[in-house]
Amino acid sequence: MGKPPPGQKTPGPSRTLGPSPKTLGRNWPGPFRKTPGRLLGLGLVRTYQLAFSPLVGGHCRHVPTCSEYAYEAVARHGLVAGSFLTGRRVARCGPFGCAGHDPVPERFSWRPPHR
């Protein structure tokens, strides 16, 4: 890979070329059913992102970050299943855990994915 043409930006570690982050925001922009449980869960995640995440700092080794993962998991799979997926993700995030791209699964399963 060579250098991009002058004026063209390259994606950073957690960005891709395309719409700017101001357009999409930091969370999953896809459609989802707006049930009371989902809205409660999304509100809690968003509160964490705005109030506590800046204090804790950006230490997540995964893409998307754990709070972005939680937002997408709750939006796609509902409050209970999304919370379960988020808990499983945070449990993998220890000092000897993995890092890198770890997307929310398309289909929910109580069993952990084979890696």
Image (cartoon, rainbow, N blue to C red):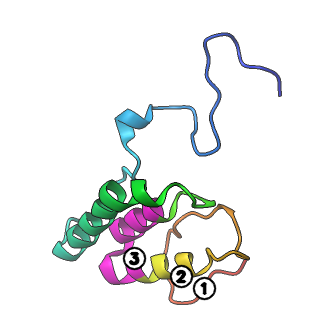
Q: Earlier in the sequence, mark 1 or mark 2?
A: 2
Q: Quadrant of the N terminus?
A: top right
Residue closest to the far bottom: 111
The residues bearing labels 1 and 3 have C-alpha atoms spaced at a distance of 14 Å
Q: Residue drawn 16% across and 73% down?
A: 36
Q: Which residue is mark 1?
A: 112
Q: Amino acid at mark 1?
A: Pro
| Residue 23 seen in this snapshot | yes
C-beta proximity under 8 Å, tags 2 and 3: no
> Number of callouts in the render?
3
C-beta proximity under 8 Å, tags 1 and 2: yes
Q: Of helix, strand and loop, which mostly describes the magenta segment?
A: helix
> Within the image, what quadrant is residue 78 found in?
bottom left
Q: Residue drawn 61% across and 61% down?
A: 62
Q: Amino acid at mark 3?
A: Gly
Residue closest to the far top: 6
Q: Which residue is mark 3?
A: 82
Instruction: Please state if 62 lies on the left or on the right of 104 as rendered.
Output: right
Which label is found at residue 88?
A: 2
Residue range (magenta): 67-83
> Within the image, what quadrant is residue 67 found in?
bottom left
Q: For the residue labelled by badge 3, is the local secondary structure a helix, a strand or a loop?
A: helix
Q: Residue drawn 21% across and 67% down?
A: 39
> Within the image, what quadrant is residue 97 found in?
bottom right
